[in-house]
Structures are given as structure tokens and as C-alpha cells.
Image: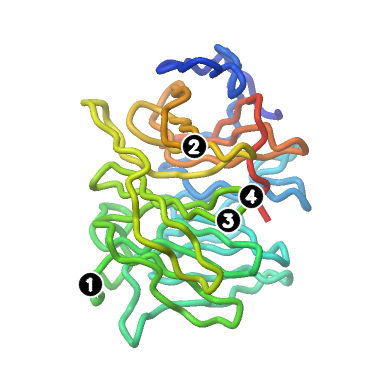
Amino acid sequence: MHGSLEHLKVEVDLCAPGWERIIDPSPPVAVLAKDIIFGEGPTWDAKNGCLWFTDIIGDTIWKWTPGKGQELVLRPSVKANGTCLDLDNRLVVAGWGGRTVFRREHDGKWTTLADNWKGKKLNSPNDIVVTSDGSVWFTDPPGGLVNVGMTGPDMQRYIDTQPVFRISPKGELSVVCEDNTYPNGLCFSPDESILYVNCSRERVIRAYDAKKDGSVGPARIFFRYGGPERGVPDGLKCDVDGNVWCTAPGGIWVHDPSGKTIVRIKTPGHHPTNIAFGDADWKTLYITMIGSVVSTRINIAGVPSR
């Protein structure tokens, strides 16, 4: 873990038996980046030893490298949101305000992968993931058309639903599902047999059995968040044991594969927006927040990013 330690620590609650295998009681927090207006989209790049992340309202894609710090990658960024890496280790971006999905080539140029569905502009691509066959999956809620400080030049909505989309290895776009009122984070189980999608408006995580042809089976409710605490389900990742991690009301929730809560990690300062596992052992948890990007150490490895 590299960054300035400012005597910050995380707290844990909602602890079920065995929670210690996830995280220590109060590990220190390293502050990696400050003055980030609305941090999002963290992805650890193992090949280059760096963290990619976005600042939606700051309209910037950043790269952070241990010992070097922040490096500006793209500004303006069309209010970029989620990021991931493809099979060729290229950065793939959900272009929230620009209503596109695009990719950073190895020479630094940018390529658009999707910007419309059947001739109609996408809503506002939010989170994004690549599977082992090279498919790109992304959520497309309408929030980028209305959220203050996050909108692009065209705020007209053209698609009536809020789909989860898939771009096949051949570049073909298809709808995976349309049963969420505001799909946000998404991730796959370690063996890619289950697709998890959280819905911010309904405060639920849905699970879908993934099929070989790129479609999914019927949704089932994996977990429903309640209570008065601020925050909605947002960032979503899996660890190597198939536990589901979600930035949600009150902090970062960790659920076992059946949906039961193992522990909640409460970060100091502002509400966490998204997470990424990283470093050589995949046991550093990188956390984007409103105002900053921080990291802490955990006791279980995350599923490696591509």
C-alpha cells in the first residue's frame, strides 16, 4: 500500500461469524488522491502497476502509480464513469455524459465501441466489465442525462428502458436484460456463471445465471438493502471465494454467495462510490469516494482484473 497515511482507519460492523477472513478490525487507510470531486471507475492494471480511475464531475480520467502519484490521462473525458481492462490490457470506459463506450488503444488513441442502440443514442453508460471471451458488458441507466454536473450536451432520452448491454467479441451490441429501473454496478462470479447487477433506485442486487451464448436467465433477488442510512448500491466486485462486495448504504458491504451479509466496511470521510482489488496479491482494496481516492489492506484476494 502506497500513499500518505493520515491516521485514518476503517471501522467494521454487521459482523457475522468468520468475518475476520475478510478484513482486520481496524486497518489503516492510505490517501492516494485528494481534490477528486466525484471519484469513480477504479481499475487496477497489474501489467503496468497502476490504478486507473475517473472523476465524473471533474471530467477527467486519471492514472495513479505508486511512488509517482497522479497523472492526467484524458480531460475532458465526456464525464467518464466506470472503467475496466480488456483481454489486450486496453482501458475500456463507460462514457457516462458522452453516451458512449470507448477504448484507449496502446498508442494512446481512443476508439468508440458503442454509441447507439438500433439508431437511438444510449442513455448514459455507467459501469462496465469484460469477460474471458472478450465480451464487454455495461449498464445503461439514464442518470447521466439529469445528474447535476454530470450531463453532456444532449440530455434528451431516446431509449425507453434501462438496459444492461453486451458487446460481443465481434463488436455486436445486444440487450442482456431490461428489468432494472436504474442498473448501476455489475460484476461476474469468479467462474463467470453468475452476473450480478445492482439497481440503485430499488436498492437491490439481482443475480442472473449467465449462458454460453451471452444471454442470461431470469433474475432473482440476491440482496435488498433497507434502513435509513444514506447511499445506494453502486460499485460491485467479487472476491476469489465468490463473495460479493458492494458500495451501498453506510459503507462497503460484503455478502457471501448466498447473499448473507458477512461484514460492512465503514470508510472514514465521504461515502464510497466504487472499489477495485489490486496489487500483486490482489489484497489491496482501492476505494473511490466523493472527494478522494484511498486504499486499505484486506485478508482475501479479489478476482483479478483483466
Q: Secondary structure at mark 2?
A: strand
Residue at the limit of the structure toward the bottom, as seen here: 119
The kind of residue tagged 3 is Glu
Residue under the image location 53 percent in, 52 percent down: 188
Instruction: Identify the disc placed on residue 192.
Output: 3
Instruction: Identify the disc placed on residue 244.
Output: none
Say which label, 2 or 1, has the lower sequence index: 1
Residue 133 appears at what percent x and percent y? 65, 68
Is 173 above or below relative to 240?
A: below
Residue that mark 2 sits on? 245
Say which label, 4 or 3, has the lower sequence index: 4
Distance between mark 1 and mark 3 Cα atoms: 32 Å
Residue under the image location 71 percent in, 46 percent down: 50
Say which label, 3 or 2, has the lower sequence index: 3
Residue that mark 4 sits on? 63
Distance between mark 3 and mark 2 Cα atoms: 16 Å
Say which label, 1 or 4, has the lower sequence index: 4
Marks 1/3 in contact by CB < 8 Å: the verdict is: no
Q: Secondary structure at mark 3?
A: loop
Say which label, 1 or 3, has the lower sequence index: 1
* Pick the front one: 202 or 195: 195
Label 3 crowd (10 A; few <14 / some 14-19 / many >=20): some
Instruction: Identify the disc placed on residue 157.
Output: 1
Marks 2/1 in contact by CB < 8 Å: the verdict is: no
Say which label, 4 or 2, has the lower sequence index: 4
Q: Secondary structure at mark 1?
A: loop
Is 132 above or below relative to 296?
A: below
The tally of labels here is 4
The kind of residue tagged 4 is Lys
| Comparing labels 4 and 3, the label whose residue is closer to the camera | 3
